[in-house]
Every structure is written in C-alpha cells, then in structure tokens.
Image: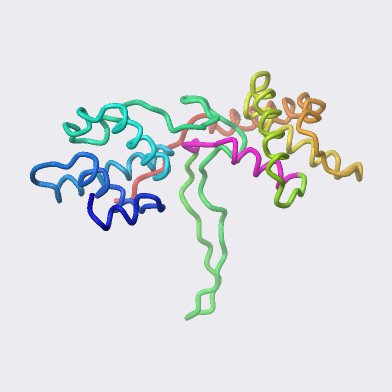
Amino acid sequence: MTTWIKSRCDETMNREELAQYFVYELVQPSGNAERRVSTAILALERLEELGWTLEEIKQELDTFAKSYPQIIRNVYHLEEIFGQKEPPGNLMEPDVFYYHNELREVPPPTRIVKDPVTGQFIRTDSEFYLEMKRRFTMNDLLAYWYRSNGTVDPKEHTRRQDEARFRYLLGIYNLDEILFAIDCAKSLREERQQSPLRNVFELERYIEDARQMLLEKINVHKLAGINQIIPKKVQA
C-alpha cells in the first residue's frame, strides 16, 4: 500500500481518491491503471446517483475484498461487485410512486429576480418534472420528525428509541402515511394550540387524517395528470 493511500484509508475519501484506492490498493492491476481509475470514477458517479454514499461504497468494497481476496484481483468494473444491490438503509421501495414531498424530486419554485442592468423584474421558471428520490433513510425520517416537533440535538438514547418506534410503525403503515401523519399532527396541534408530539407512537392517532390528506393529494394529481413519473429532461 502506498504512503498516500495509507494516510487516506481511515478518512473520508472523495470520488477520485476512492477510485484510486479501488484500483491501486484492492485490484492492483499489472498495467493500464490510469484508465481503470477513470472508469472507476464514472462507476462511482453512477452509484452515487443511485443513492449510495462514498463511505458505503468503500465499506462494500472492503467487505468484498476481505471475503473474496482472490476474486478482487480479477475485478475490472465496480459494477461486478455491486450488481443489482440496493443502497443500504433505504426506506423507499423500488417502483413505488410516492406522494409526500420529502420523497420527491421536483423543480425549484418560480423566482422573480431584478435584472442588475435593466432594473426590470424577470420571472424564471424551470420545466416541470416529477421524479422519486433515490433514497430516504431512517436518519432522514428522524430528521423530519425532529424538525416537525422542534426537537433540537436529540440525545443518542432518544434517537435509538425513536428509531425502534418508527421501525415498528413501518411494519404497519407505509412511508407516505407516516410522513403525512407527522404533517397532520403538527398542523392540527398548532390549530388547537397544543404542544408538539414527542412520542412517535402517538402518530397512530393521526393516521386516518394522514390517509385523508394522502387521498386528496392523489385525486388532485389524477385530475392534473401528474400521478406518474415525469422525467427531468436532460440538457443538450
């Protein structure tokens, strides 16, 4: 292992550094290494687009190399290791059309900006698209819950308890229902001047309200013809 790689192994690597780690340290090819690094960088970019983080990719590579030390030397493409694996910790199911905004990718809202030269106001719009996020993890769900009820910097034991409670609820309700229940609880309790929820299990009291909110959004989307994926156009 080179001195440079030794100094980086226990740190967070960027895409190029991880590609070099894969080629020079794990595969150790006899030739054409620079081209293989370039190929690995492109593969890492594709994996990130699918929702993987570089830290998770490195962990997967290290696990594979430890389990199959002879095979790793013959791997040419990263895809040979990852295949059809889903990123770890993803609460979203493949091919499911979600309705909650936290699970979607949409264009930014319309902006009106003042032209610094002419002084005129210019409206800027982005072409509409509707895609699902690649990934939504338990950490994302907890973060949304804490933002909703105003919890700042929750303690570790609180996070562990809340994670266990959410995992229980996810065995009964789907992700859309839980997120809409968080929204309903916040909105209804503010209207009634009640304090925010603190116990995750109390969200069950708002599931029917959440389902009604979800149904209304589904109907609106059907009428608008946007109850399906509308891909973002690739800029030429």
Residue 186 sits in quarter: top right
Q: Please give left or right for residue 135 compared with residue 234 in the image.
A: right
Residue 187 sits in quarter: top right
Magenta segment: 131-148
Q: Is residue 70 magenta?
A: no
Q: Please give left or right for residue 88 compared with residue 145 in the image.
A: left
Farthest-out residue, top:
172
In this view, the residue in front, 76 or 216, is 76
Residue lying at 54% horizontally and 79% vertically, measured from the top left:
119
Horizontal and vertical percent for residue 153? 70, 51
Horizontal and vertical percent for residue 162? 71, 34
Horizontal and vertical percent for residue 141? 63, 38
Q: Is residue 141 magenta?
A: yes
Horizontal and vertical percent for residue 225? 54, 31
Farthest-out residue, bottom:
117
Q: Please give left or right for residue 74 compared with residue 66 in the image.
A: left
Residue lying at 63% horizontally and 29% vertically, measured from the top left:
176
Tell me if residue 174 comes above or below residue 28 in the rendering: above
Residue lying at 46% horizontally and 49% vertically, measured from the top left:
127
Main SS, magenta residues:
helix
Q: Please give left or right for residue 200 compared with residue 101 in the image.
A: right
Farthest-out residue, right:
193
Residue lying at 26% horizontally and 36% vertically, measured from the top left:
78
In this view, the residue in front, 16 or 74, is 74
